[in-house]
Image: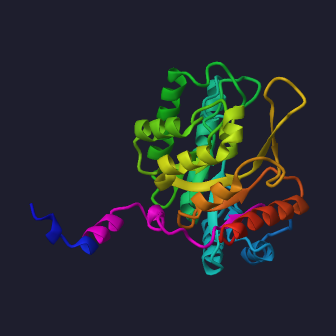
């Protein structure tokens, strides 16, 4: 064997070339992450929308349009985003895809298809929904049938139908993890990716939604590392929230909170996310612009500690 005669540089180049685009900078992290969030000003034109984003130094944005928007308006917003170097992170469609009521389920699937069409037309990173719930009262609530194999198979078939009907080429359809619905862990997300078997099925990562026990609460950094290790090449967008564990009761109760007021390991989160190229971190679920400003200030301060600009 003549292994010593191999050109190591050629081998290294070939290996890098074979990696997913999202992982081209995996070894040496990017120096920045695209942070984004909602804007509260009235932004009724591409120009005013961009101005509102730039006012907060956002480099990522939620899709500003709704399904059914005119094609010329979609193009105008897409071009404005590209010109301003803003990534449109996602088109969110929050509706129950596996409702036990047939009419509601069919309606949800059709609405999701239209949202995916918009995401593809405007060039968003993904269209994201949750898988849904068998809970008749809470569209995304807990239910004993949510985490069964039968429901898993239904999610697979529903996701295939959505992707196969729309046939997106520029975007991905993704399912946000939930504590009591698939995908509820990195491993179950991998199971879904394999079972769905569609190139345009991607990952939307919200690590806070995966913190479902005191063990995960106190070791969120390790859980986050596992998610990026297993799902990294498929991740299209991320949500940034935080979480607290109540200490004055004797059963575990977790509460979502503003980034910086909880215990989630943002240092690890940002370091792992910085290994991906142009995958946004989107803040959500806050009530005022002031709260978003405080959240952004905290996230940026955590990034600064590890040499990452947001």
Percent position (x, y) of residue 7?
21, 73
Is residue 17 within the magenta segment?
yes
| Frontmost residue, 47 versus 74 | 47
Q: Quadrant of the C terminus?
A: bottom right
Residue 64 quadrant: bottom right
Residue at (88% x, 26% y) in the render: 249
Percent position (x, y) of residue 239?
68, 53
Residue 117 quadrant: bottom right
Scheme of image coloration: rainbow
Percent position (x, y) of residue 119?
58, 58
Total labels: the figure holds: 0
Relative to 203, residue 77 above or below: below
Residue 68 seen anywhere in this rendered image of the structure = no
| Frontmost residue, 49 versus 192 | 192
Residue 74 seen anywhere in this rendered image of the structure = yes
Residue at (81% x, 24% y) in the render: 251
Percent position (x, y) of residue 230?
48, 46
Residue at (49% x, 50% y) in the render: 229
Q: Which residues lie in the magenta part?
A: 11-38
């Amino acid at each position: 064997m003549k292994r010593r005669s191999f050109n190591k540089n050629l081998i290294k180049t070939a290996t890098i070339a074979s990696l997913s685009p999202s992982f081209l900078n995996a070894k040496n992290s990017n120096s920045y992450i695209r942070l984004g969030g909602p804007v509260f000003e009235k932004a009724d034109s591409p120009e005013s929308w961009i101005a509102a984003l730039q006012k907060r130094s956002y480099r990522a944005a939620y899709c500003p349009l709704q399904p059914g928007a005119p094609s010329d308006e979609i193009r105008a917003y897409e071009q404005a985003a590209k010109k301003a170097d803003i990534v449109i992170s996602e088109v969110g469609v929050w509706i129950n895809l596996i409702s036990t009521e047939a009419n509601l389920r069919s309606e949800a699937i059709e609405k999701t298809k239209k949202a995916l069409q918009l995401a593809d037309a405007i060039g968003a990173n993904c269209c994201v929904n949750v898988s849904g719930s068998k809970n008749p009262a809470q569209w995304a609530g807990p239910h004993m049938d949510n985490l069964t194999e039968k429901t898993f198979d239904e999610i697979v078939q529903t996701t295939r139908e959505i992707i196969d009907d729309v046939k997106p080429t520029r975007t991905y359809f993704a399912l946000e993890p939930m504590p009591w619905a698939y995908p509820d862990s990195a491993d179950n997300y991998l199971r879904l990716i394999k079972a769905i078997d569609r190139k345009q099925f991607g990952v939307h990562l919200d690590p806070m939604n995966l913190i479902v026990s005191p063990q995960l609460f106190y070791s969120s950094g390790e859980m986050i590392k596992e998610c990026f290790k297993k799902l990294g090449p498929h991740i299209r967008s991320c949500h940034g929230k935080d979480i607290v564990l109540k200490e004055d009761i004797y059963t575990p109760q977790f509460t979502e909170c503003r980034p910086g007021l909880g215990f989630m390991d943002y240092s690890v989160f940002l370091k792992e996310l910085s290994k991906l190229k142009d995958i946004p971190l989107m803040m959500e679920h806050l009530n005022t612009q002031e709260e978003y400003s405080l959240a952004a200030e905290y996230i940026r301060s955590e990034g600064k500690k590890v040499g990452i600009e947001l």
